[in-house]
Amino acid sequence: MSNSVFNLTVLGSGTCAATVKRSMSGYHVQHETSATEFLMDIGAGSLRRLLEAGHDYRKISGIFISHFHIDHIADLVPFLWASCYTPDFSRDEPLLICGPPGLKAWYKNLAVTHGDWLLELPFQLEMQEKNDEVWEWKGIKVTTKSLKHSVPVNGYRFEHAGRSLVYSGDTGYCDALIQLAENTDLLLIECSFPKGDAILDFHLTPDIAGEVARKANANKVCLTHMYPECDLVDIQSQCAEKYDGAIELAQDLRRLIV
């Protein structure tokens, strides 16, 4: 553990299909060097899973949103509400929220539904719209790439001290994903449906995810964002048809180190 750079906890390995086994998309990452903690997506169930995993929502410094489908952002408002109104807690640190273009307008629309308190938070909110950019945040090199989905979506790559973690968000097969994942230590990649069942080229199946990993020369793959159909077949073997590296299956509360 002492040699790790990023510690990943799966908060939600599921999709919009509500199940007891899998919460909707959400992941906690701790950067060991700086002790910075951040989230990648924050779908329904993320806040509860965060606490179940023993993490403290008050220590989250950033939230990286892949896209604005509800199964990836549903717990953002509860997270902000808790950050504002938990008794005996006053947040001092700014909170970064990063997402694809349209983030700021989308956030303003949240206030229409949930109230103006979202526009008057008692701490600094840093809204960053990123698209195909490389930048630095708290000593971490962050790369965002626009990927392939039914709405604008960002994939993210986090790098420090020669280690890297890549998160695909929701996407279909595209060259941009292969480029983003090149030589990464861990590719956290969506795997929505079993082989042959991808919908409208906006999602991946295990064999296609494996092809991405092979072409990117990823060191390890973790398949995630799985609809219930994936639990009925051996998706690990389907992925291994195209990729001969290490393959992990995401489960809620599972931890991986990079």
Image (tube, helix red, strand yellow):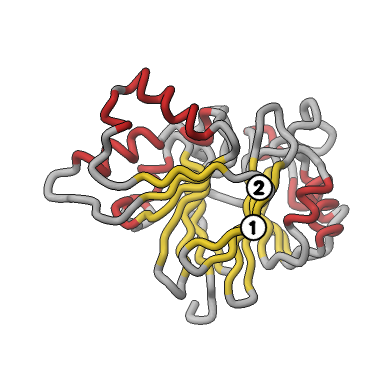
Q: Quadrant of residue 110?
A: top left
Q: CA distance from mark 2 to mark 1?
A: 12 Å
The answer to whether 52 appears left or right of 173 in the picture is left
Return the residue nearer the eye: 226 or 32.
32
Expressed as whole percent of the image width and height from the top left, the position of residue 82 reads 26, 40
Expressed as whole percent of the image width and height from the top left, the position of residue 176 reads 78, 48
Q: Are marks 2 and 1 in contact (CB under 8 Å)?
A: no
Return the residue nearer the eye: 224 or 152.
152
Expressed as whole percent of the image width and height from the top left, the position of residue 144 reads 64, 51
The answer to whether 94 appears left or right of 254 in the picture is left
The answer to whether 22 appears left or right of 83 in the picture is right
Q: Quadrant of the C terminus?
A: bottom right
Amino acid bearing label 2: Gly
Q: Earlier in the sequence, mark 2 or mark 1?
A: 1
Instruction: Check disc 2 and report the residue beneath it.
Output: 155
The answer to whether 81 appears left or right of 102 in the picture is left
Secondary structure beneath dot 1 equals: strand
Taking the view exactly as shown, the residue that stands out farthest to the top is 113
> In the rendered view, would you say 258 is above or below 228?
below
Taking the view exactly as shown, the residue that stands out farthest to the bottom is 2
Residue at image position (68%, 67%) is 185
**What crowding class fits label 2: few (fewer than 14 Cα within 10 Å), some (14-19), or many (20 or more)?**
many
Disc number placed over residue 108 in the picture, else none: none
**What crowding class fits label 1: few (fewer than 14 Cα within 10 Å), some (14-19), or many (20 or more)?**
some
Instruction: Check disc 1 and report the residue beneath it.
Output: 134
Residue at image position (30%, 56%) is 93
Secondary structure beneath dot 2 equals: strand
Expressed as whole percent of the image width and height from the top left, the position of residue 227 reads 64, 34
Q: Is residue 178 visible?
A: yes
Q: Nearer the viewer, mark 2 or mark 1?
A: 1
Amino acid bearing label 1: Val
Residue at image position (27%, 34%) is 120
